[in-house]
Structure formats: structure tokens, C-alpha cells
Amino acid sequence: MKKTSFENSLHPTVSIRGADVYKGALNRAAQEELLALVRKIVQAAPLYQPVMPSGRKMSVRMSAAGEFGWVSDAKGYRYASVHPLGMPWPAIPELILRLWDQVSGCSRHPECCLINFYSPDARMGMHQDNDERDFTAPVVSISLGDDGLFRVGNTTRGGKTESLWLRSGDIVVLGGEARLAHHGIDRIRAGSSDLLQNGGRLNLTLRVVT
Ligand code: MD6
Ligand code: FE
């Protein structure tokens, strides 16, 4: 079988406000392999549209793999051990764990692989990933499909921010001082990738939860 690019060693190529970005970490074969794994996950645990505590619907659709999925509804944000429809979350595929091992510098394994799907008009407001217990473990994100404009700010709200287009196959590691940096996705560049047959962007975020 064709060697996936991450069986070679990976090195960050860009840093924005302390977030390490591995541009082009995954070659096309690796992206396709990951996409097939994501399809299997969402067949078992379908993408759903989360509602924020404010009552507004999020524009992304979500699912997850692992012991926990991050969910949002009228009651608030939390990690849950079952999908909102009641089924257990599928296990995190081995390939994704190997990727984590290559870039995380963390001896623990992720307990959540959150899956976000963006149609061309979806976005993700500025937020912190702070529902986890152990902030010494980084958050690792993998982008597939259309380009997304990623913005990174500060640990506190407001202040200076920097933006970078994330392309299919890019990996971001938020660790160290940047672990609690605010970040979001401002927009999607429709049609910029042909990885997903019907377009859109997938982002996988891997987190140690407990
Ligand atoms: C996204 N990413 O790329 C949203 N969180 O669609 C995130 O929210 C994120 O990229 C923590 C660490 C890296 C990320
Ligand atoms: Fe995040």
C-alpha cells in the first residue's frame, strides 16, 4: 500500500501566535484514507446540528469519535459519552492515534476526536477549548477539504489576532502558551479542494478530556 506522508517525520512549518502549523502534513493518499475513516464514523454516529445555550443553531455540523464527544445544546457545552441520538461514539481510528503520537509530544492519547463539517457558509466564532481538565495536553487539529480562514488571538478575549488559511492536509497544534488561545474559523473558500465530492470542509480536533 502507498505510504501515507505522516509515516515520515513531521515538522511544524509556520507558527501563528504560538500555534504550530504543519502545512501540507498529509499527502493526498493520507487525506483520502482519513476521509474514508471519517465517513465510517459519521455512518455510525451521524453529523447533527448543535444548538448553543443561547438557543442559536451552530452553523457547523458535528459528530465525534472516542470515549467522549463534545456536545452543545440548550443545557450548555459538555463532554458526553453518547451521541445526542443515543448511540455510543465510535472508537478513534488507529491511524489518527498514530498521527497524534507524531505531533502532540504528549504521552496520553486523545479521548475525543471531534468532527466539524463546514458547508461553504459555515463558520466558527472565536472560542477557547477549555472544557478539558488537563491543559498540559495540546489540542491537535486536522483539516480536510475546502480551505478555512483560521484566526488566532490571545488567552484573554480581544486584542491582536493573526489569520492563516488552513488547507486540506494541514495540521495545527495548540499547546503550551497557545493551548488556551482564542481561535475561530472566519470563512470557507468554496470549491478550493476536490477532496470532498460535494465540497465543504472537515476539521478533526483531538483532545485529552479527563
Ligand atoms: C477548525 N478548529 O479548524 C476549528 N481548536 O475548524 C478549532 O476549533 C481548533 O483548529 C483547537 C485547536 C485547534 C483548532
Ligand atoms: Fe477550538
Image (tube, helix red, strand yellow):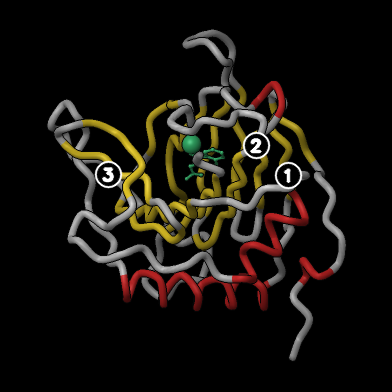
Residue 63 drawn at (x, y percent): 34, 57
Label 3 or label 2, whichever comes before in sequence order:
3
Inter-mark Cα distance, 3 to 1: 31 Å
Mark whose residue sits in front, 3 or 2: 2
Label 1 or label 2, whichever comes before in sequence order:
1
Q: Is mark 1 on a helix, strand or loop?
A: loop
Mark 1 crowdedness (10 Å alpha carbons): few <14, some 14-19, many ≥20: some
Which residue sits at x=65%, y=44%? 172
Q: Mark 1 points at which residue?
A: 106
Q: Name the residue under label 2.
A: 137
Residue 41 drawn at (x, y percent): 40, 71
What's the residue type where badge 3 is placed? Ser
Q: Mark 3 points at which residue?
A: 59
Mark 2 crowdedness (10 Å alpha carbons): few <14, some 14-19, many ≥20: many
Residue contact at pointers 1 and 2, CB within 8 angstroms: yes
| Up/down of 133 relative to 71, above or below | above
What's the residue type where badge 1 is placed? Cys
210 or 184: which is nearer to us? 210
